[in-house]
Image (spheres, coloured by chain):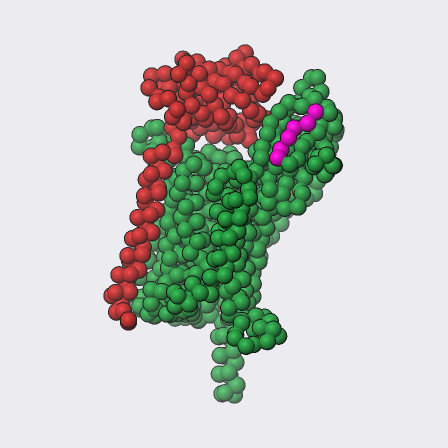
C-alpha cells in the first residue's frame, strides 16, 4: 500500500502526537506528586502541612541545639530568627554541618511538630549559604546578604 | 611581561574574530573568492593568538606568578605541576579561556579540513563560528579578564579547592567543553546553510563527522564527571540530577538525536528541516548550560563565584544566538526543498521515533530543571525538583525508546518489514526475557525493576549482536564467509552496534544499583559492619600527613565468607589554609562491583562512624559509556564519514579527465 506524501506526514504527526502526549502525561503527573516544596520554620508553622507529605525545610542550626547519640541518631533545631523547629535524623551529617550554619533537610513533619529528616544537605563550599535558606532568613529579616544566595 | 602579551594576544584574537565574522560572509554573499578566503586565514590566526594567550596564562600558573590575581586566587606554589596546569580551568576566568580556546580550535579544524567543501558554505560556516568566538572572547575580555594584575604582590597564593586537586579536574572539563563547544560547528553549519538556502546530502556528509566528534567527547565528559563525583564527593551516588548535570545531559540528548538524524539526511536526503532545527537546538542547549553554570541562577555543586554582569552578558549571548538561529530558521526553512519519501515502517521512521523520544526526554529534563526557577519568579514558592521527578518522567521515556531500539536498528531503509525485523530479533528478545525471568525467580529482595532492567540491557546487547550477525550470515555460507562478511560491514554499522550495546551495558549497571546494599554504623577497632556478602572490619584509625594536607584515616579489611578480600582506607582531609575537611571515600573494586566506604566522624575513643556500600556491577555504568564513545569513534573513522573524501576524489577524477 503506497501512501501519499500527505498520508505519510499524517503518520509522522500522529506519532509525534502520541509521544508528546505520553511525555506530557508523565511530566504533569510528576509535577503534581514528585515535587518537594521548601518552607522556613515560620512558614511551616503558619501553614497546615498534611501528615506524610514530603517537605524541605531550612534555616540556621541553632547554637547549642545539636545532640548526637551513639547509634547515629541526631537531633538539632533549625531557626529563622522567629520560629524554632526541632529536627530528628538518623544518619551521617555532611562535612559542612556546623551549629550556626545554614542547613536544608528533607523529610516529613510528625504530628508532634518534629521534623523527621531522611536527608540533610550541605554544599561543597565553605562560604555557601543555601539559596532557599537565605531567602527564608531574608523574609524574617535576619539575613542581610545578597538576594541571590550563592555569595561568592 | 608575558602576561601582558597574553592579554594583548587575546584582544588581537577578538579583532580577528570580528574579521572572521564579517568578511567571509560578505564574500559569500557577494561571491567574491578573495574575501571568502579571508575566513580560513582569520580562523587559523585567531587560533594562533588564543593559543598564545592561553599558554601565557598557563605559564603564569606554572611559574606561580602571584602578581596575577587569578593565579593568587586559585594556585599555590607548593601545588604539584599537574594541578598547576589543570588549575587554569578550575575557576571561572580560566575555564572561559579553555572554552574560547576550544571554540577557535574547532574553527581552525573546519578551516583545515574544509578544503573540499563548497566555498560559499565554508565561508559562511566560518563566519558564524567567528561570531560565536567574537561573543565569547568579548565576554572574557570585558567581564572575566584572567590576566588582571594585583598589587601589592602576595607572597603566596590561596591554593586550589581541595576537591579540585584530582586527576578528574584534568580530564572532565576539557572533554566536556570539547563536546559542548563541538556542537557549535553543527550550529554554524545549520545557520550557514540557512543563509544560503541550500541543504542537501552533501551538507549532511560534512556536518555529520563534527557532530559525531562533539557527541563522542560529550559522552566521555559526562561519564568521567559522573565517576569523579562518585569517588570524590563521598555520597556514594553517580548521578544527582543536579542542575549542572542536567545542563550537560540536555545537549547530549539533543546531540544524540542529531547524530541519528544526520544519518537519515545523508543517506536518504530526508528530514532536512528537522536536522537543521536540531543542530540549532543542540548548541542552544550547550549555551543554556553555560548560562546555568555561570550565572548562579540555579545553585549546584558547581557554583562558580557568580557575578550578575556575567549572567546578564551570557544571557545576551544566549538570546542572540538562540533567537537569531531560530528566527533565521523560521524565515528560511519554508524555502527548503522537500526531502525523499519513505514508509512509516522503515529505518527512517524508526529514527523519527528515536528523535521524538529523545526530544521528549530532553523536554522533561528541561522542564524539571527550569521549573523551580519559573515558579519562584511567578509565585515566590521555593521547590526542589529532584530524582523522584526525573525518575518518573525522563526514565520511562528512555526505557520506552530503548525497548524499541533493537527493532528500529534492524529495519531496512525506505521500506522496512516489521515481521522480518521481529523474526531477526526473535532469539535476542527470547533470551532477554528469559534472563529477566530467571533473575526474577532467583534473586530475592531488591526492586522488581532491577531484573527487568537487566533484561532490557541484555535485549540491547543481544539486539546489536543479532544485527551484525543477520547482516553477515547467509543460508549455506561457510563460517569463513560469515566472518569475512562481518568484517566487511561498514565501520559505521559496527559503531552503531557497539554504541547500542554500550547503552545496554550501562543499563545493566544502573539496574544493578537496585541490588546495592548500604549500611551505617559506629565501629571500634576490631568491630565489623555487614554489607551484603561482605563485611568491613576496622583495623585501626590513624593520622597521616600528605602533600599539603593532614588526614585522619580509618583502615578497614574487607572480608568475604571469612576470607580477606582487600583493604579500604577512607579519611577526612584538612588541607593547608582550609577549615573544612573533605571526605575521601575508600573504594575496593571486586570484579565489576565495588565496596565503597565513606567515613563521617572520628571519635575520641578511637571509634569511627561510617557509611558503607556494596555496589554490584557498578563499573558497567561507565564501561558502557566508554563503549558508546568507542562506537562513535568507529562511526567517525568510517570511510564515508571522512571529511571531503568524496568531493576530493570527484575533483581528482575531474582533473584526470581534463588534463590541464
Q: In front here: A107 or B173?
A: A107
User: Which of the 4 image quarters holds residue A70?
Assistant: top right
Residue B629 is one of the magenta-drawn residues: no
Chain A drawing hue: red
Q: Is residue B329 left or right of residue B390?
A: left
Image quarter in which the N terminus of chain B is found = top right
Per the picture, the main secondary structure of the magenta-coloured stretch is strand
Q: In front here: B447 or B378?
A: B447
Task: Relative to A3, say whether A54 is above or below.
Answer: above
Task: Relative to B343, say whether B211 is above or below.
Answer: above
Q: Residue at x 51, y 70 (%)?
A: B471
Looking at the image, the residue that sits furthest to the top is: A64
User: Which of the 4 image quarters holds residue B232?
Assistant: top right
Residue B170 lies, in percent from the top left, at 62, 45
Q: Is residue B147 left or right of residue A54?
A: right
Residue B372 lies, in percent from the top left, at 38, 34
Q: Which residues are magenta?
A: B527-532
Residue A75 lies, in percent from the top left, at 52, 16
Residue B359 appears anywhere in the view = yes
Chain drawn in green: B
Q: Residue at x 44, y 57 (%)?
A: B405
Residue B304 appears anywhere in the view = no
Q: Is residue B588 left or right of residue B499?
A: right
Task: Relative to B81, say whether B205 is above or below.
Answer: below
Residue A133 lies, in percent from the top left, at 44, 24
Q: Is residue B550 left or right of residue A141?
A: right
Looking at the image, the residue that sits furthest to the front is: B441
Amino acid at each position: 500500500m503506497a501512501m501519499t506524501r500527505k498520508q505519510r506526514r499524517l503518520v509522522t504527526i500522529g506519532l509525534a502526537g502520541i509521544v508528546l502526549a505520553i511525555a506530557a502525561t508523565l511530566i504533569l503527573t510528576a509535577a503534581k506528586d514528585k515535587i518537594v516544596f521548601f518552607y522556613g520554620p515560620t512558614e511551616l508553622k503558619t501553614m497546615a502541612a498534611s501528615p506524610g507529605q514530603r517537605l524541605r525545610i531550612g534555616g540556621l542550626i541553632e547554637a547549642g541545639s545539636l545532640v548526637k547519640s551513639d547509634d547515629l541518631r541526631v537531633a538539632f533545631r533549625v531557626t529563622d530568627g522567629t520560629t524554632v523547629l526541632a529536627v530528628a535524623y538518623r544518619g551521617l551529617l555532611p562535612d559542612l554541618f556546623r551549629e550556626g550554619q545554614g542547613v536544608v533537610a528533607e523529610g516529613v513533619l510528625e504530628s508532634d511538630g518534629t521534623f523527621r529528616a531522611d536527608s540533610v544537605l550541605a554544599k561543597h563550599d565553605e562560604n555557601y549559604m543555601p539559596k532557599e535558606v537565605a531567602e527564608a532568613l531574608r523574609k524574617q529579616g535576619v539575613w542581610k546578604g545578597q538576594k541571590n544566595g550563592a555569595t561568592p | 611581561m608575558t602576561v601582558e602579551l597574553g592579554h594583548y594576544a587575546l584582544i588581537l584574537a577578538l579583532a580577528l574574530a570580528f574579521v572572521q565574522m564579517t568578511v567571509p560572509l560578505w564574500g559569500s554573499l557577494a561571491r567574491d573568492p578573495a574575501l571568502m578566503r579571508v575566513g580560513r586565514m582569520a580562523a587559523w590566526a585567531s587560533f594562533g593568538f588564543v593559543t598564545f594567550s592561553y599558554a601565557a596564562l598557563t605559564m603564569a600558573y606554572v611559574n606561580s606568578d602571584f602578581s596575577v590575581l587569578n593565579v593568587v586566587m586559585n594556585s599555590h606554589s607548593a601545588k604539584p605541576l599537574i594541578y598547576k596546569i589543570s588549575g587554569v580551568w578550575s575557576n571561572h576566568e580560566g575555564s572561559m579561556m579553555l572554552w574560547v580556546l576550544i571554540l577557535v580550535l574547532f574553527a581552525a579544524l573546519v578551516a583545515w579540513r574544509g578544503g573540499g567543501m563548497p566555498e560559499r558554505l565554508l565561508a559562511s560556516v566560518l563566519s558564524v563560528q567567528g561570531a560565536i568566538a567574537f561573543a565569547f572572547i568579548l565576554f572574557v575580555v570585558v567581564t572575566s579578564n584572567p590576566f588582571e594584575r594585583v598589587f601589592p604582590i602576595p607572597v603566596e597564593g590561596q591554593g586550589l579547592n581541595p576537591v579540585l586537586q584530582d586527576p578528574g579536574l584534568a580530564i572532565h572539563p576539557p572533554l566536556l567543553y570539547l563536546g559542548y563547544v563541538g556542537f557549535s560547528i553543527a550550529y554554524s553549519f545549520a545557520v550557514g546553510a540557512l543563509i544560503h538556502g541550500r541543504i542537501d546530502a552533501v551538507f549532511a556528509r560534512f556536518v555529520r563527522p563534527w557532530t559525531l566528534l562533539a557527541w563522542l567527547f560529550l559522552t566521555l565528559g559526562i561519564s568521567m564527571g559522573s565517576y569523579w563525583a562518585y569517588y570524590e564527593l563521598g555520597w556514594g551516588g553517580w548521578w544527582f540530577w543536579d542542575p549542572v548535570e542536567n545542563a550537560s545531559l540536555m545537549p547530549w540528548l539533543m546531540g544524540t538525536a542529531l547524530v541519528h538524524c544526520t544519518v537519515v539526511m545523508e543517506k536518504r536526503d530526508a528530514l532536512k528541516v528537522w536536522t537543521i532545527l536540531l543542530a540549532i537546538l543542540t548548541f542552544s542547549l550547550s549555551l543554556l548550560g553555560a548560562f546555568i553554570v555561570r550565572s548562579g541562577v540555579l545553585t549546584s555543586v558547581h557554583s562558580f563565584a557568580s557575578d550578575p554582569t556575567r549572567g546578564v552578558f551570557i544571557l545576551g549571548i544566549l538570546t542572540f544566538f538562540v533567537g537569531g538561529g531560530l528566527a533565521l530558521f523560521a524565515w528560511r526553512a519554508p524555502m527548503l526543498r522537500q526531502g525523499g519519501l519513505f514508509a512509516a515502517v522503515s529505518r527512517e521512521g524508526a529514527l523519527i521515533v528515536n528523535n521524538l523520544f529523545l526530544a521528549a526526554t530532553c523536554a522533561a529534563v528541561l522542564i524539571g530543571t527550569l521549573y523551580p526557577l519559573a515558579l519562584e519568579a511567578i509565585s515566590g514558592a521555593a521547590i526542589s525538583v529532584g530524582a523522584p521527578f526525573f525518575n518518573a518522567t525522563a526514565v520511562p521515556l528512555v526505557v520506552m525508546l530503548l525497548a524499541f531500539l533493537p527493532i528500529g536498528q534492524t529495519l531496512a531503509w525506505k521500506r522496512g518489514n516489521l515481521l522480518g525485523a521481529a523474526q531477526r530479533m526473535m532469539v535476542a528478545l527470547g533470551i532477554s526475557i528469559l534472563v529477566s525471568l530467571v533473575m526474577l525467580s532467583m534473586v530475592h529482595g531488591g526492586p522488581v525493576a532491577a531484573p527487568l532492567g537487566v533484561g532490557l540491557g541484555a535485549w540491547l546487547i543481544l539486539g546489536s549482536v543479532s544485527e551484525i550477525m543477520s547482516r553477515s550470515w547467509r543460508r549455506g555460507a561457510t563460517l569463513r564467509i560469515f566472518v569475512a562478511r562481518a568484517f566487511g560491514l561498514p565501520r559505521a554499522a559496527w559503531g552503531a552496534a557497539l554504541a547500542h550495546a554500550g547503552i545496554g551495558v550501562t543499563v545493566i549497571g544502573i539496574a544493578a544499583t537496585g541490588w546495592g546494599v548500604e549500611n551505617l554504623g559506629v565501629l571500634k577497632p576490631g568491630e565489623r559492619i555487614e554489607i551484603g556478602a561482605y563485611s568491613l572490619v576496622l583495623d585501626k584509625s590513624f593520622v597521616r600527613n600528605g602533600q599539603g594536607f593532614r588526614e585522619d584515616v580509618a583502615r578497614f579489611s574487607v572480608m568475604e565468607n571469612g576470607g580477606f578480600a582487600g583493604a579500604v582506607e577512607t579519611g577526612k582531609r584538612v588541607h593547608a589554609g582550609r577549615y573544612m575537611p573533605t571526605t575521601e571515600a575508600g573504594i575496593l573494586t571486586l570484579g565489576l562491583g565495588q565496596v565503597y566506604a565513606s567515613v563521617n566522624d572520628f571519635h575520641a575513643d578511637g571509634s569511627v562512624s561510617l557509611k558503607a556500600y556494596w555496589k554490584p556491577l557498578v563499573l558497567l555504568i561507565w564501561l558502557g559509556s566508554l563503549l558508546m564513545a568507542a562506537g562513535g569513534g568507529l562511526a567517525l573513522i568510517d570511510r564515508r564519514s571522512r571529511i571531503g573524501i568524496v568531493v576530493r576524489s570527484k575533483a581528482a577524477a575531474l582533473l584526470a579527465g581534463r588534463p590541464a
